[in-house]
Amino acid sequence: MTRALHLAEPATGLHSGLLPATSYHYPAGDAFEQASSGRPLEAPETQDLASHLHRFGERPAATGTSGPMLLGILDEVGATGAGGGHFPVARKWRSALRNGGGGIVIANGAESEPASAKDRTLLTLVPHLVLDGLACAAEVLGSTQAVLWLHEDARDARRAVAVAIAERRASGMAELVVRQELAPARYLSGESSAILRSLSGGPALPAFHRRPAAVDGFGGGPAVVHNVETLARIGLLARTGVRGHRPTALVTVTAPAGRTVIECRDAATVGEAVRDGGWRGPDPQAVLVGGYGGSWLPWAVARGVRLRDSDLRKVGAGLGAGVLIPVGAGECGIARAAEIAAFLADAGARQCGPCTFGLPALAQRLAALADGDIRRDEVARLDELAALVVGRGGCHHPDGAARMVTSALRTFASDVKRHAGGRPCAASGTLQAEVG
């Protein structure tokens, strides 16, 4: 049930986005079982193979001469990974091909970012589009194994994907059989080297610095790991080509009422996305862009920046995991950053000095600042501690934590001074302790 890939005539009449609708809201405390409309996410019109083919059409084959054509499409549209690193997809594939091709291709659906809901939304609503992208990657690379990597507690996504895989097998699709592998429900088990380490029989923890898996290989051949959003986009691009491509941005926006996954034009701004994602009332004072390992930006800076990694880099941030976490005018940004720092310290693999000692020390000192239990001359130590962990960890986890902390100190600089001086936080009007 595939057709050849042709670039001369772009597909017409195809939905230009990944998701059936532009937003999906998950109320606070919701277990992802259903959207705010009350309609179960496993509704047949958004999951079964027949509805998928009706909406998108058959998947073009990516074998033979169609493989280089697809690589050309990925190059021309500037397709990058959506897992946080935003590495060019075509470059990763060419690296694997230069190292002999074959090997293993992995769809990483182990969404570890606590604030995100993108991967589960994609896997539950459009699992076939993710599997299409995985099949295309396997065909271009000549892979001998295809794996879908999921957290063991992602029950809704696991059910949806299991049904989709069974449907594809029953339909006789000529493609590599996909197997599911389950990861421990830990923050770092979705890191690419942790995936490969676990599949090799080791713990699902990051490996120390190494060359990319597409170069070093896995089990005798190269390994290519892609986030499920990346694969869904590949599945769509294989159909639309360059001329039919309509770029979108997929982000999760947090708000007091819960989380909302929105798909918007990639020229949309952070401010527009936050409002479309359910933020109500006065403007927030700041927003954490990119997720827990991202960067804080003042609202005055963030609101006008487009949701493109290249644009965000110009203001010291990045799209990262595709998460926007606004902080309201009445909230204490330092306290919020301290909570996140504590989570990241607890989530460390404890395999290197920065995770074992650096992140806990950083989190403890930031918590002391949030409590007003720190002197002005000690605040500089926070920046020093952050600098000590950057680039020295076994993986990039400490780097993200340090980035979040240092950007919080800059963004909430006036509150830092007030906390360190024993005065009430300008935002919340409260302080837990007086400094002697």
Image (tube, grey):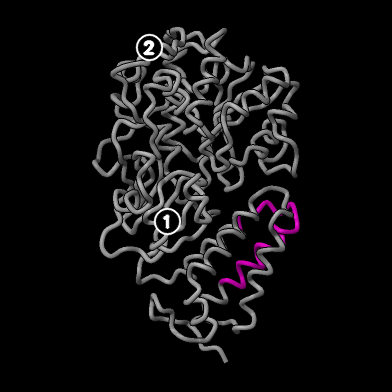
Place of residue 105 in the rendered image (x, y in percent of width and height, measured from the top left): 61, 24
Q: Residues within 10 Å of mark 1 (few under 14, many from 20)?
A: many
- Quadrant where the N terminus sits is top left
Relative height, residue 249 to residue 276 (above, below): above
Q: Secondary structure at mark 1?
A: strand
Amino acid type for the residue under numbered disc 2: Glu
Specify whether residue 23 is in view: yes
Specify whether residue 163 is in view: no
- Is 388 magenta? The answer is no
Tell me, for residue 9, which label it has, or none.
Answer: 2
From the image, state whether disc 1 or disc 2 is nearer to you.
2
Tell me if 353 is positioned left or right of 20 in this view: right
The residue singled out by tag 1 in the image is 325
Residue 301 location, quadrant = bottom left
Relative height, residue 227 to residue 175 (above, below): below
- Is 347 magenta? The answer is yes
Tell me if 11 is positioned left or right of 100 in this view: left
Residue sitting at 70 percent across and 40 percent down? 203
Residues 200 and 352: in front is: 352
Residues 11 and 173: in front is: 11
Farthest residue, direction bottom: 436
Q: Which residues fall within the magenta stretch?
A: 346-366
Q: Residues within 10 Å of mark 2 (few under 14, many from 20)?
A: few
Residues 372 and 41: in front is: 372
Residue sitting at 45 percent across and 68 percent down? 333
Place of residue 175 in the rendered image (x, y in percent of width and height, measured from the top left): 52, 12
Residues 318 and 332: in front is: 318
Residue sitting at 58 percent across and 47 percent down? 186
Amino acid type for the residue under numbered disc 1: Ile
Could you tell me what secondary structure mostly forms the magenta stretch? Answer: helix
Farthest residue, direction left: 37
